[in-house]
Amino acid sequence: MTLLRACLAGLLGLMLATSAFAQTSNSDSGRAAVLDTLFAKLQSTTDPMAAQALEQAIWEQWTMVPDRDQRQLMLLGMAEMQQQDLQSAVATFTRLIEIAPDLSEAWNKRATVYWLLGNFDASISDICETVKREPRHFGAYSGLGMIRAQMGEPARAAAAFELARKYNPHIVGIDDEIARLKAQAGADAPVDPLGCGERTAGR
């Protein structure tokens, strides 16, 4: 799992390093079209450098917040994460969720902070809200896979990583990790890795 942990640490770093925030209003339909294009290219590319660039562009679209007040909260919460001020980050992303409940990345950021705090139940709950709004969120599914593995649920962890791979087939080490988890799970039947009931949009 070491290689995948390193990859997920890289995903976290990429998520925090994203800096291309929109300064002007972008329509939801326009952003959706951009994401559709980026995901289509991510599926088809065979160039690792291109895949990395596409992945970063997707993160930028997810974290792009046109509204000034919302953008300031997003930036503040990300800075608090970088500074390991995790309780403050929870409070900041909670405020952002309260004023922008449809912003998928606000939920994902708070899910990540809860994961870093070891609050797995709260993290999974926020992952459910994330993928309800963005069913292709490979970062959320990757985090979920780590949580399920740490909870001793290899079948659910493998299923979560398979969802991550479905939308981003270029995650380093994920094939080996899925195979390892499936071998560990043995005869256990695959189950819903999210536990969100009808909100498992990525399935």
Image (spheres, rainbow, N blue to C red):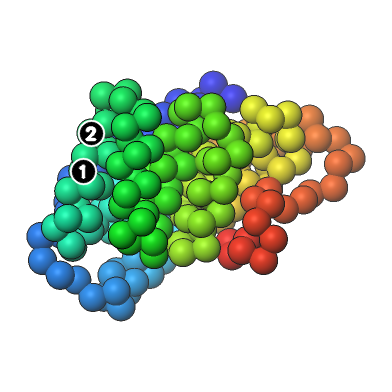
Residue at 31 percent across and 32 percent down: it is 88
Q: Which residue is mark 1?
A: 75
Residue type, mark 2 in image:
Ala
Q: In which quadrant will I find the C terminus?
A: bottom right
User: How far apart, in angstroms, are the residues tagged by discs 1 and 2?
Assistant: 6 Å
Q: Is residue 8 left or right of residue 62?
A: right
Q: Dot 2 surroundings within 10 Å: few (below 14), some, or many (20 or more)?
A: some
Q: Which residue is mark 2?
A: 79
Q: Dot 1 surroundings within 10 Å: few (below 14), some, or many (20 or more)?
A: some
Residue type, mark 1 in image:
Leu
Give the residue at the far right of this rendering: 187
Residue at 37 percent across and 54 percent down: it is 97
Q: Position of residue 151 (x, y in %)?
A: 68, 30
Residue 37 visible in rendering = no
Could you say whether the residue bearing mark 1 is in a helix, strand or loop?
Answer: helix
Residue at 79 percent across and 49 percent down: it is 190
Task: Give the mark count.
Answer: 2
Looking at the image, is 69 positioned above or below residue 29? above
Could you say whether the residue bearing mark 2 is in a helix, strand or loop?
Answer: helix
Quarter residue 85 falls in: top left
Residue at 65 percent across and 56 percent down: it is 196
Q: Position of residue 20 (x, y in %)?
A: 17, 51
Mark drawn on residue 141? none
Q: Position of residue 41 (x, y in %)?
A: 37, 62
The residue closer to the viewer here, 19 or 1, is: 19
The residue closer to the viewer here, 189 or 38, is: 189
Q: Is residue 191 left or right of residue 10?
A: right
Q: In which quadrant will I find the N terminus?
A: top right
Residue 198 visible in rendering = yes
Q: Is residue 143 left or right of residue 44?
A: right
Disc 1 to disc 2: CB gap under 8 Å: yes
Q: Is residue 173 left or right of residue 200?
A: left
